Image: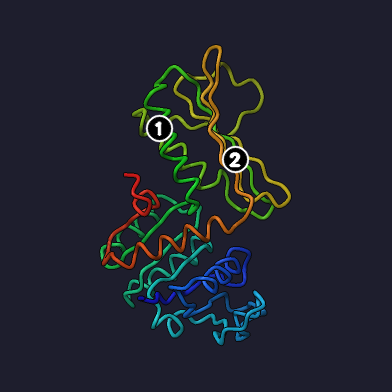
Amino acid sequence: MTILNIAVAGSTGRMGRVLLEMIAESSDMRLSAALDQKDNPFLMKDAGELIGSPCGIPIKSDFVSALPGSDVLIDFTRPAGTLAHLAICRNAGIKMVIGTTGFSAAEKEVLKAASEDIAIVFAPNMSVGVNVMFKLLEVAASKLLNDYDIEIVEAHHRHKVDAPSGTALRMGEVIAQTLNRDLTKVAVYGREGVTGERAAETIGFATIRGGDIVGDHTAIFAGIGERIEITHKASSRKTFAVGALRAARFLATQRNGLFDMQDVLGLR
């Protein structure tokens, strides 16, 4: 059995710890590097201690020295950090699974350029269920066409810093592309006061932040006399980790290119 060497960025955070746990439980993966910011209080401590299972891998901040020997870096951090890590991985020939959200259009072009040299799975949501939902949205939009008003509602924990979520935006993109609409022109991200009647082509977004909500997403297709709601609710970050590890296994067979979870799951 081939063992994949996996590095984890943001290893001491909520998502990072879940990834450490899932890698430790995997029979075909081993943790090769645990990384975090320079001011992190856990630096040089055994990463396994974060999950109650010492592994001999110290948490480091120097990506350049820590990454050699890794096959894949899994990164669920923030855009600036991910782009810095991307440059190092591109230079070192290390593949990446990127679950970071909040990238600008220009930053996404940087990911695309780097994929000429390394293989990357980039998805705003690594959950297998969410990515099946994307496919369901495509089917729904292709059948309902322009006869239904479309609204997207998402809810996350109080610590999330970007809105709408990357998953919600991807939902809007899937629907807009299916309906031959330009999301940048038809998206409405907030309503207040006297807004006038709803424009038929609008795709609306509503954002909720509070507590420890892992992630809820609903697309509403509201017609005359009926409505269809397609919802995904995450109750544990493990669902994202399972998808990320599945993406890492997919990358083992890829030399370069930019992929998403639709590629990983064979939903194209």
Residue type (three-letter) at the residue carrying disc 2: Glu
Q: Position of residue 179 (x, y in %)?
A: 37, 27
Question: Which one is nearer the viewer's eye here, 192 or 54?
Answer: 54
Residue visible at 46% across and 79% down? 63
Q: Residue at x 38, y 51 (%)?
A: 265
| Position of residue 167 measured from the top left corner of the image (x, y, whole percent) | 50, 45
Q: Mark 2 packing: few (<14 Cα in 10 Å), some, or many (20+)?
A: many
Of 108 and 214, the residue lying toward us: 214
Quadrant occupied by the N terminus: bottom left
Residue drawn at x 42%, y 33% as measured from the top left: 175
Amino acid type, residue under disc 1 in the picture: Ala
Q: For this view, does 51 lie left or right of residue 75? A: right
Rendering coords of residue 158 (x, y %): 69, 51
The quarter holding residue 191 reads top right
Q: Which residue is mark 2?
A: 154
Say what secondary structure mark 1 lies in.
helix
Lower sequence index among marks 2 and 1: 2
Between marks 2 and 1, how big is the CA–CA gap? 17 Å
Instruction: Tell me where residue 169 appears, x and y as whole percent.
Output: 48, 42
Instruction: Give the answer, above or below, for where 43 lies relative to 227.
Output: below
Q: Residue at x 55, y 55 (%)?
A: 239
Compared to residue 264, the image places residue 66 above or below, namely below
Q: In this view, which residue lies farthest toward the right?
A: 211
SS under mark 2? strand
Count neighbours of disc 1 (C-alpha within 10 A) and say few if under 14, some if 14 to 19, many if 20 or more.
Answer: many
Q: Which residue is mark 1?
A: 176
Q: Are marks 2 and 1 in contact (CB under 8 Å)?
A: no
